[in-house]
Image: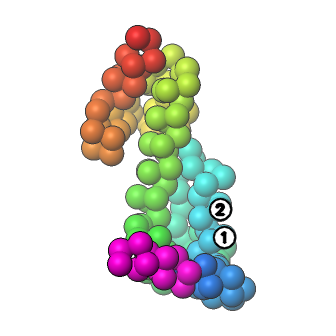
């Protein structure tokens, strides 16, 4: 039953995305913009304007489509990219944090630990051993 329900939700979302002028298709434009520039500061008013919505309407539709806020979505992208960097060879936690747009390594480490359950330095240690 769970797999069926998941498929139904995905199918409805895909149909909405395929309709050109739907809110979901406009949110997909914002998602692409965030993905292209996840390391840069996120300007919600500019994204809302890009997709022809007010900031509050954009926020509501973004959350309806993705299940998260624009800032949380960006943070998740940043953390996933940093994890990949740490696993693939970036030399330090600070380098990974800076490369994905975090200004402060301690904040990055806290957020990373919350998301993945281990501190970022553990990824470096795993790679070395």
Inspect the magenta stretch and tell me whether residue 64 lies in it: no
Task: Return the x and y of residue 22 as percentages of the image width and height.
Answer: 63, 88
Helix, strand or loop at mark 1: helix
Query: Crowdedness of circle 2 by 10 Å Cα count: few (<14), some, many (20+)?
Result: few
Report which residue position mark 1 lands on: 29
Taking the view exactly as shown, the residue that stands out farthest to the top is 129
Q: Main secondary structure of the magenta part?
A: helix
Q: Describe residue 49's horizontal placement relative to residue 82 as left or right.
A: right
Residue located beneath label 2 in the image: 32
Dot 2: element: helix
Q: Which residue is at a point 34% across and 23% down the rendered structure image? A: 122
* Image quarter (top left, top right, bottom left or bottom right) of the C terminus: top left
Looking at the image, is 104 positioned above or below residue 36?
above
Query: Farthest front residue?
Result: 1
Residue at x 54%, y 61% (from the top left corner): 43
| Residue 8, magenta (yes or no) | yes
The tag on residue 79 is: none
Q: Can residue 55 be spotted in the picture?
A: no
The residue lying at 33 percent from left, 45 percent from top is: 115
Q: Position of residue 111 (x, y in %)?
A: 32, 42
Residue span colored magenta: 1-12
| Residue drawn at the location 45% of the way across and 18% of the way down | 127
Residue 116 pos. (x, y %): 33, 41
CB atoms of marks 2 and 1 within 8 Å: yes
Q: Quadrant of the N terminus?
A: bottom left
């Amino acid at each position: 039953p769970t797999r069926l329900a998941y498929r139904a939700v995905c199918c409805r979302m895909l149909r909405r995305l395929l309709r050109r002028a739907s809110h979901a298709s406009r949110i997909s434009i914002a998602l692409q913009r965030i993905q292209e520039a996840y390391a840069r500061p996120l300007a919600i008013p500019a994204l809302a304007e890009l997709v022809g919505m007010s900031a509050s309407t954009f926020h509501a539709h973004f959350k309806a489509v993705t299940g998260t806020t624009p800032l949380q979505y960006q943070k998740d992208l940043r953390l996933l990219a940093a994890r990949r960097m740490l696993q693939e060879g970036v030399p330090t936690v600070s380098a990974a944090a800076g490369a994905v747009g975090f200004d402060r390594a301690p904040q990055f480490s806290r957020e990373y630990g919350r998301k993945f359950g281990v501190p970022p330095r553990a990824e470096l240690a795993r790679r070395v051993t």
